[in-house]
Amino acid sequence: MENSDSGVNVAVQQDVAVDHLLMSRDGKHSEGAELFSGPRQGDPLCGVLCPQPGAFPDDAGEPGLGQVCSESAATLSGATVSQAHEVSASKVAIYDELRQFLQRMDRDDRLRDRVIKEILEVMDKGYKERWEAMDKDSKESMEALNKGNQEAMGKLHTVIDEHLPAVNNRLDEGEKNLGALKEVCDAVEEKTNNLEVQVFAIESDTTEPALGPWTFGSALGWSSPASEHLSGELGLALEEVSWVAGVTPLAAVPAMLVTALTVGRWGRRPVMLALGPPCAVGWALVAFGRALPLLLAGRVLTGFCGGAFCGAVPIYTGEIAEKQIRGALGVFFQLLLTCGILYVYVVGKAVSLQTLGLACGAVPVAFTVLFFFAPETPLYLLGRGRREDAIAALRWLRGPAADISGDLAEMDEVITSAKQRKDGVLSLVRSRAAVKGLATGVGLMICEQLSGVNVIIFFSVSIFASAGIALDANTCSIILGCVQVLSTLASALVVDRAGRRPLLLVSHVGMAASMAGVGAFFHVRDTGSAAALGWLPVTSTCAFLFFFSIGSGPLPWAILGEVFPDEVKPVATAIVGATNLILVFVVAKSYANLVEAFGVAVTFWIYGVICFAGAVWIFFFVIETKGKTLEQIQRELSGRHDQDAQSDSTADEFRLK
């Protein structure tokens, strides 16, 4: 029994040792280890679990608890020892495996630490080598780049040194070109401003005064549609009809002289305004008069007022216009005159004689109302010492934003030159410029009327009939009126670009060729059959009116306002205008005599020769006035070639181009 107990104790002790090894590494015990160690001798718990025999007194003669425990222990001791040995053996095996596992883990940890250390050493070495290689490559690249940059900069400096003079030269040229471009831009801007001023001037300054020529054109053209009404409705004889038709241009001749005496004393604007009411009264007499005296009185009034307009309007437009558009404004005189003729042709074809007279009378009424708001010419106001009024008139004519200093200086120069010439009207015979200007105006009017233009207009119906074209007189007149209006409009558009002389030369040469064509047709007709040439007279007639309307018709009236000095302008204009009207009568009267003496063909050839002779005279005698101031024109007519004036003219022509 004692041997058994000693074996158990040995086993228990081994258990305790293993428990201690298992539960506490590094020689330390944990609280959990005591649960597996079992009771030890001397512990209080051991005394409780395994009390010594007799530890507790017997109760009521029964055996004590200690005895019972002893007996129970004795009974179980055999089985317990056997089981304890088995458990201990299992624990020992487990503990051995655990110890071996822990040892392997220690070895693996050391191996892992060594491998990681070696890997880190290799990585550090690799990174260091790569960094050193990259650093070396970077240095080499930077050195190569710096070397390349230095070489490139050297080449660049060489190229710059080689081309720098050329570049500087080009820059200098560029600066010069820039300066020239700036001058061109300034010129374009100035031209644009001038164009705006010109448009304003054309809109505000030509409509009102140009209605005066419209009135005279209506008076001249009225006899064409009214002749049938006069002989049919009123029963007038052919001789009476001829007097009603012909008295108008005759009444215009003295009106030219009256205008010359009044516009210089009372002014251009008051005289022109005073013509409106009597002209309207004259048309009222024409519209409502049924007796011959009333008709003649009405025609005399309309003719007189129309002739006065012909004397005053060229002076007015020549003094208010800028030199860049003076030609166009002068052509507007003839344009509105032809519009007045066409107006009567169209209205007279559709209405009665009374309505036609009222329609014509509305024009001078409209003129009076519109022209009432127009100013006097600044040149006239400066000549009378009214400088402030002249400046206000220029502002009205050019527009509020326009620069009028140049125009004012030119007008001052004209007034100063006029005051230095003390001869007045006697300058017409003493001043070379005035004499040459008068010769120019009279010569141009002779060329205009002796060209046979009125013969073409008066006998256009018979010319068309000879070509086999059956048209009534009114339709034929309307066609020719349209040709005149469109051609004159074309002249107004190009006169300030092409110039006066080129248009006059082309006009007279073209008229000569057209008259030759008309004469050739009548020559063939008189000597044989002209059926195959039916197109020739119509084409030649329309061509003649076209060439007449682009030059010989409108430009003499435009030049009237340019070539005369201020002190003789009214008288000289009246003389030239009267010459024109007298020649109208002479040509109309002499046509029948020429046909009777030489035949139709030779008569038209005579007109053609006169046209060609006019072209030769214009080439050698008439000066160009395009783009020149009035004072420059006077210098040129007098034979004094002022270098500054020529330079100004050249600059002005360059700006226009």
Image (spheres, grey):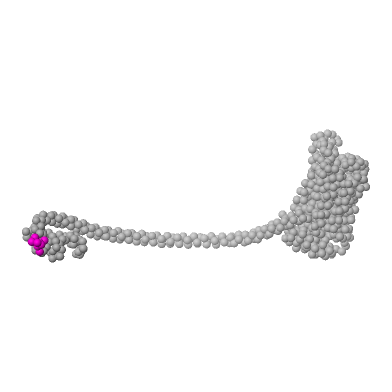
Q: Based on the displayed image, in which of its 4 quarters is residue 597 positioned? A: top right
Image quadrant containing the C terminus: bottom right
Residue occupying the point 15% across, 55% down:
87
User: Does 283 sit left or right of 1 as displayed?
Assistant: right
The answer to whether residue 585 of the structure is visible from this angle is no
Q: How many marks?
A: 0
Asked whether 592 or 465 is in front, the reply is: 465
Q: Residue furthest front?
A: 60
Residue occupying the point 38% across, 60% down:
134
Q: Position of residue 286 (x, y in %)?
A: 88, 47
The answer to whether residue 121 of the structure is visible from this angle is yes
Asked whether 523 or 471 is in front, the reply is: 471
Figure check: 473 above or below 265: above
Image quadrant containing the N terminus: bottom left
Residue occupying the point 72% across, 56% down:
196
Q: Position of residue 76 (x, y in %)?
A: 10, 56
Q: Position of residue 102 (x, y in %)?
A: 21, 58
Question: What span is in magenta?
Answer: 57-67
Q: Based on the displayed image, in which of its 4 quarters is residue 434 positioned? A: bottom right
Q: Position of residue 211 (x, y in %)?
A: 81, 52
Q: Is residue 346 magenta?
A: no
Residue occupying the point 25% across, 59% down:
109
Magenta span main SS: loop
Figure check: 86 above or below 382: above
